[in-house]
Image (tube, rainbow, N blue to C red):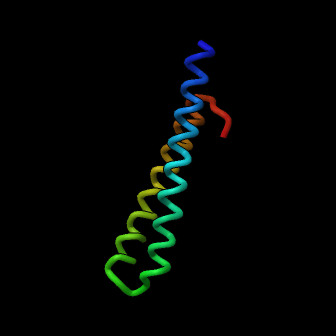
Amino acid sequence: CRRQEAILMEAAHNFRNSIVIIGGFSRRIARLSKGTEMAGNAVSLQKEVKALEKHFTRFEKYMNMKV
């Protein structure tokens, strides 16, 4: 059981890191490409990342993981 918990914690950590990287990269793209279609796409990506973060936080709470 502890091994499964450790694997789950590691996977959650890796997912969280990926979400943060995508969010940061999309914010940078939006800032650097202001007024273009790409900026709009980056903002849309930011919204999706925020939604994913909410779902992931709920998952962590459900699994009683430390947030």
Farthest bottom residue?
Answer: 35
User: Where residue 36 sits in the image (x, y, percent)?
Assistant: 35, 84
Quarter in which the N terminus is drawn = top right
Quadrant that contains the C terminus: top right
x, y percent for residue 18: 50, 49
Q: Give the vertical position of 50 relative to 32 (above or below).
A: above
Q: Residue furthest left?
A: 37
For image coordinates 55% across by 45% down, the residue present is 16
Is 33 placed left or right of 60 in the picture? left
Does 17 sit above or below residue 42?
Answer: above
> Which quarter of the figure has residue 35?
bottom left
Q: Position of residue 44 (x, y in %)?
A: 38, 67
- Residue drawn at (56%, 43%) of the image: 57
Residue at far right of view: 66
Please determine whether, in this image, residue 31 is positioned above or below residue 8.
below
Residue at (61%, 23%) from the top-left corner? Answer: 6
Q: Residue at x 63, y 15 (%)?
A: 2
The residue closer to the viewer here, 62 or 20, is 20
Residue 10 is situated, as x and y percent measured from the top left of the image, at 57, 32
Numbered circles on residues, count:
0
